[in-house]
Image (cartoon, rainbow, N blue to C red):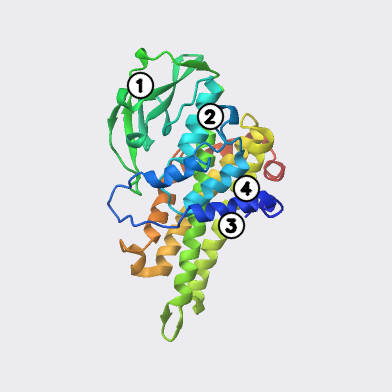
């Protein structure tokens, strides 16, 4: 919970409502492709959460990134099988930017290459349409809302068995609406921030699972949590999770205050993506060490979250790409301390 949430009654109420909407964990087993949770999606739609940040005049709820952050964190903690980020923060935003109508339906979004292809598109097989962004010529980008029936699709999954499909669109048959070239860059930053927030929620849940296990599990006559080595594992999980959350909160605050065109916002998102990506490795490793063999079983909840954070950190930019961006920004600034503290 951020300081802003603590000080805002409406945000606290919203966070409590989300806790009731999302139930942590599911019955997904290792190796099974995760299925779109249609019942949960219908609930989100009825509550106005499926298009949370959309303009009210276009059927959205008119919220901002602060509310979206709470939603994504709750969805990440619950391993929710719904495209909340894709439908609203990516597809919905692209349509609004292009001045296109956002009719009812489930959407995801993708950036196409010169051949009209996009790889690892989230939830493509389950949506009604895909909002695509492509470069029409050197200085022009276009957006179109393409029905699922007009898209060639090859099914794929990520490490967590979430749908990540490869799609092909005949861009020559599309007209689309022209958008500024900056939209392509913003798409990446928006996606990275969304994944960071979902990962923060998942890591919070992992920490909760580990604490519950080492408190209840007794070995050699005392709880596992009484052993110093186990305490060190849990402490590292808590520290890395807290660092990731702090960086994500700072990125949300920057985006809310300055927008995505700001260099300060993009630096903050790069920091958040880097911190979260590095934290994911420590959190997943230490959690499995603390839980031992039970954490690797199909029945235990841990793998649902650990595999997600390890998968999400490579979407919308790899950890190394965000590290490189931070290094470049620090070199360009010539003053690393100011870049960190301002």
Q: Earlier in the sequence, mark 1 or mark 2?
A: 2
Q: Earlier in the sequence, mark 3 or mark 2?
A: 2
Mark 4 near mark 1, Cβ–Cβ under 8 Å?
A: no
Quote the CA–CA distance across marks 1 and 2. 21 Å
Q: Is residue 274 visible?
A: no
- Determine which residue is flagged by label 3: 242
Name which residue lies at 40% across and 24% down: 112
Q: Secondary structure at mark 1?
A: loop
Quote the CA–CA distance across marks 2 and 4. 21 Å
Name which residue lies at 55% across and 62% down: 238
Which numbered circle lies on residue 116? 1
Quote the CA–CA distance across marks 4 and 1. 35 Å
Quote the CA–CA distance across marks 1 and 3. 40 Å
Mark 1 near mark 3, Cβ–Cβ under 8 Å?
A: no
**Classed neighbour count for the residue bearing mark 1: other residues with Cα under 10 Å, few (<14), some (14–19), many (≥20):** some
**Classed neighbour count for the residue bearing mark 2: other residues with Cα under 10 Å, few (<14), some (14–19), many (≥20):** many
- Determine which residue is flagged by label 2: 93
Residue sitting at the far front:
46
Q: Earlier in the sequence, mark 4 or mark 1?
A: 1
Name which residue lies at 43% across and 86% down: 221
Q: Earlier in the sequence, mark 1 or mark 3?
A: 1
Q: Quadrant of the N terminus?
A: bottom right
- Determine which residue is flagged by label 4: 249
Q: Secondary structure at mark 4?
A: helix
Q: Nearer the viewer, residue 123 or 319?
A: 123
Location of residue 311 in the rendering, given as x and y in whole percent from the top left corner? 40, 47
234 sits to left or right of 285: right
Mark 3 near mark 2, Cβ–Cβ under 8 Å?
A: no
Q: Secondary structure at mark 3?
A: helix
Relative vertical location of residue 187 with respect to residue 279 in this rendering, above or below: above
Relative vertical location of residue 3 with respect to residue 108 in this rendering, above or below: below
Q: Nearer the viewer, residue 196 or 144?
A: 144
């Amino acid at each position: 919970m951020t300081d802003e949430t603590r000080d805002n009654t409406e945000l606290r109420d919203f966070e409590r409502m989300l806790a009731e909407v999302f139930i942590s964990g599911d019955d997904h087993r290792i190796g099974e492709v995760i299925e779109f949770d249609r019942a949960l999606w219908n609930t989100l739609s009825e509550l106005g959460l499926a298009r949370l940040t959309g303009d009210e005049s276009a059927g959205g709820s008119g919220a901002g990134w602060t509310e979206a952050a709470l939603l994504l964190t709750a969805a990440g903690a619950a391993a929710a099988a719904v495209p909340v980020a894709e439908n609203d923060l990516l597809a919905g935003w692209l349509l609004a930017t292009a001045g296109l109508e956002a009719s009812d339906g489930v959407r995801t979004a993708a950036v196409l290459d010169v051949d009209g292809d996009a790889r690892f598109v989230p939830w493509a097989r389950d949506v009604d349409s895909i909002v695509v962004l492509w470069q029409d010529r050197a200085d022009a980008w276009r957006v179109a809302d393409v029905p699922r029936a007009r898209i060639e699709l090859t099914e794929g999954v990520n490490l967590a068995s979430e749908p990540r499909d490869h799609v092909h669109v005949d861009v020559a048959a599309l007209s689309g609406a022209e958008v500024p070239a900056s939209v392509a860059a913003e798409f990446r930053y928006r996606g990275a921030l969304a994944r960071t927030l979902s990962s923060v929620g998942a890591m919070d849940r992992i920490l909760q699972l580990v604490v519950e296990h080492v408190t209840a599990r007794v070995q050699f006559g005392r709880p596992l949590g009484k052993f110093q080595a186990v305490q060190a594992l849990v402490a590292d999980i808590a520290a890395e999770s807290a660092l990731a959350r702090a960086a994500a909160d700072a990125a949300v605050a920057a985006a809310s205050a300055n927008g995505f065109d700001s260099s300060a916002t993009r630096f903050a998102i790069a920091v958040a993506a880097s911190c979260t990506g590095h934290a994911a490795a420590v959190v997943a490793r230490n959690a499995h060490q603390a839980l031992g063999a039970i954490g690797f079983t199909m029945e235990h909840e841990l793998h649902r979250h650990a595999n997600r954070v390890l998968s999400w950190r490579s979407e919308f930019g790899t950890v190394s790409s965000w590290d490189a961006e931070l290094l470049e920004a620090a070199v360009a600034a010539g003053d690393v301390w100011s870049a960190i503290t301002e």
